[in-house]
Image: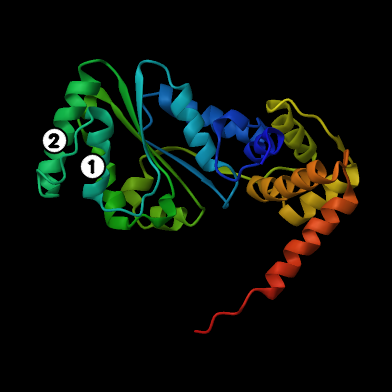
Amino acid sequence: MNLTQNKLNCAFETDPDPNFFFESTQHAEAMSRLQFISQDKGINIGVLTGEIGSGKTLLCKLLARSVNYTSRIVYIPSSNISYEAILDTIIYQLSGVRKASELQMDRYLLHNEFEKILNDYIITTGSHLIIVLDECQMISTECLKNLKCLTNSNESHSSVSLIFCGQPEFNQTLNQCPTVAQRVGLMYYLPYLQEVDIAPYIEHRLNQIGRKSEIHPQAISMLYRFSRGCPREVNKICKIAFEHMELENEPCFSNELIDMIISDIQQQKLCMPVQAF
């Protein structure tokens, strides 16, 4: 793989990369709300939901980069773990020390250790701890209720805020925990990109690697209809398209090329074996 192809792969990688963040109206609003939570100690809980591939994780990673010196962020990439494991992760990210084995995953002992770490690293320095839990649609109601208790820690100090980030199914779990729902101070649903965003989105990612390309409006319309504006799907198709253009020395992001790629993807889906149940 040559340097140009490697750059193109980076530009349209499906893994979230804050370096390629595109500030659509919707993503800018979501980012603004996340930053507001990080700056306002009065918000106990914030919720960011969106469909698969909409850019939620990218926003969380961008938030971690943008917080000021008065805040500390703990990012937990998957909420499909026990409350004790979450406590251990928080303690580790703040202090650099794992406590789960030493404390035998005992909830009471881990919570006491969390209180100590919170006091040493956050409260005494006047900081604000933001705990971001990604993929929160997988969290259990029991774990959710326990996590709420973290915002009770030294309540007068308002030192801890939780941000739950995940698919809309999380709202069903939240509705089963009214005491948690009552503490939600900010919610936002992140939609997919609109059709008018697609061309600027592609151009922005190309600009980040010093590239430009002629893009046909009809190709954008086809890409939008197939992807529904999902950034992850847009990236997937663009990665194939620009690799093809590079190999075949084609100068244009054309509707014929996008039609060919979409047809190939649809054909692959038709050829996938049906699993027996």
**In the foreground, 211 or 223:** 211
User: Could you tell me if the residues under marks 2 and 1 are in contact, i.e. CB atoms within 8 Å?
Assistant: yes
Residue receiving disc 2: 113
Instruction: Specify which label sits upstream in the sequence, 2 or 1.
Output: 1
Residue receiving disc 1: 87
**In the foreground, 37 or 218:** 218
Picture residue at 73% right of the left edge, 32% below the top: 206
Figure quadrant of residue 13 = top right
Q: Where does residue 10 sit, x and y in percent of width and height?
A: 62, 37
Picture residue at 72% right of the left edge, 53% below the top: 227
Q: Where does residue 32 sit, x and y in percent of width and height?
A: 55, 27
Q: Is residue 130 visible?
A: yes
The N terminus sits in image quarter: top right
Picture residue at 76% right of the left edge, 40% below the top: 198
Picture residue at 63% right of the left edge, 45% below the top: 191
The residues tagged by marks 2 and 1 sit, at their Cα atoms, a distance apart of: 9 Å
The kind of residue tagged 2 is Glu
**In the foreground, 64 or 235:** 235
Q: Is residue 44 left or right of residue 198?
A: left
Q: Tell me if mark 2 has few (under 14), some (14-19) or many (20+) residues whose alpha carbon lies within 10 angstroms of its own.
A: some
Q: Is residue 20 left or right of residue 244?
A: left
Taking the view exactly as shown, the residue that stands out farthest to the front is 2
Q: Is residue 272 above or below residue 109?
A: below
Q: Is residue 36 visible?
A: no
Q: Where does residue 24 sit, x and y in percent of width and height?
A: 68, 33
The kind of residue tagged 1 is Leu
